[in-house]
Amino acid sequence: MTSKCDVCRTEEAKYTCPRCFTKSCSLKCCKAHKVEKKCNGKRHQTGFVDIKDFDETVLKSDYHFLHNIVRESDGASRDLRAKKRRKVRGRVLEFKKKCEERGVDIRIMPAGMEKRQINTSHYDRKRDRIMWHIDWIFEAALDGELRICSKYVDENSTLKEAIESNVSGGSSSRQKKWPGKAASTQYRLKEYVSGAYTILMRKQACTRNGDPVYIKIEPSSRLCDVLKGKRVVEFPEFLVILGMDTSIYQLDEEKEEEGEAKDTEE
């Protein structure tokens, strides 16, 4: 048995609104019911459907509804990841620019490389300073070579100040977070407490036979002055040896000659 149109009540109904279930006979009546009932004509996808009214059409509608949710969720995740990548890329470019302004030949490795992942070096806008990630290699530590990383070292700090934060336990954040580990590190570095050590920085270029070349650095030098004019891959690495004997290391001859010339002039 056919029913009459719920709008004009004269013609036989041909269509049923999927949202409010109003029956209409034509496009004119369909538009009229949308204005009258403020209906958008779209099925209420989260509305309750009785089991007796659940058919293939409702099943397809539910499937497409869930599919759209998954698609929008994936799209939002991709947008978030892309936004994060742009933000990180912007910070890296800013850091690289500030290094070049200070005369540092900084080299950034591709994403995914280990040094790229662990590097915390960045440019601090508020303080207008570069905060460096530094790797220290203490060859004469107890129980063998010890490698320590210092995070967020101010470029205006001297190397002596940065080393003493590891040797004497000046890094309070490390002590608070890992007190046992900090105490163990200080014990292994107790031979360096006297301050009788030499700092060497490895050059990126090696000799013809592949041996590493080092530059002797004064502990009282500021980090920004040390890195000026040098090539740095991600972050600087310093070798700290006990005493002043550097005969077993291949030193940069040009730097040595410059140092001897300055001593002669004085």
Image: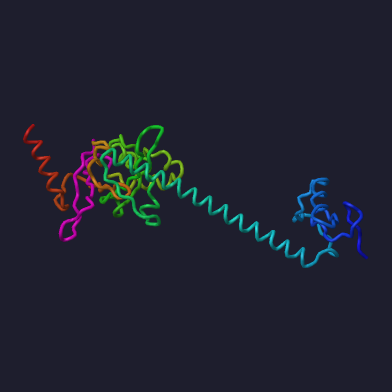
- Residue placed at 10% from the left, 43% from the top? 257
- Residue placed at 34% from the left, 37% from the top? 154
Q: Does 199 sit left or right of 7 as displayed?
A: left
Place of residue 216 in the rendered image (x, y in percent of width and height, measured from the top left): 19, 44
**Which is more toward the observer, 84 or 214?**
84
**Which is more toward the observer, 141 or 108?**
108
* Residue 61 versus residue 107 in the image, above or below: below
Q: Does 59 sit left or right of 179 as displayed?
A: right
Place of residue 220 in the rendered image (x, y in percent of width and height, measured from the top left): 23, 35
Q: How is this picture coloured?
A: rainbow
The count of marks equals 0
* Residue 47 versus residue 161 in the image, above or below: below
Place of residue 103 in the rendered image (x, y in percent of width and height, measured from the top left): 25, 40
Q: Does 211 sit left or right of 127 as displayed?
A: left
Magenta residue check for 14: no
Magenta residue check for 197: yes
Q: Quadrant of the N terminus?
A: bottom right
- Considering every residue shown, the one lying at the far bottom of the view is 56
- Residue placed at 63% from the left, 58% from the top? 70
**Which is more toward the observer, 12 or 86?**
12
* Magenta: main secondary structure: loop
Q: Quadrant of residue 171?
A: top left
Start-end of magenta stretch: 192-220
- Considering every residue shown, the one lying at the far right of the view is 1
Q: Quadrant of the C terminus?
A: top left
Q: Does 76 sit left or right of 48 as displayed?
A: left
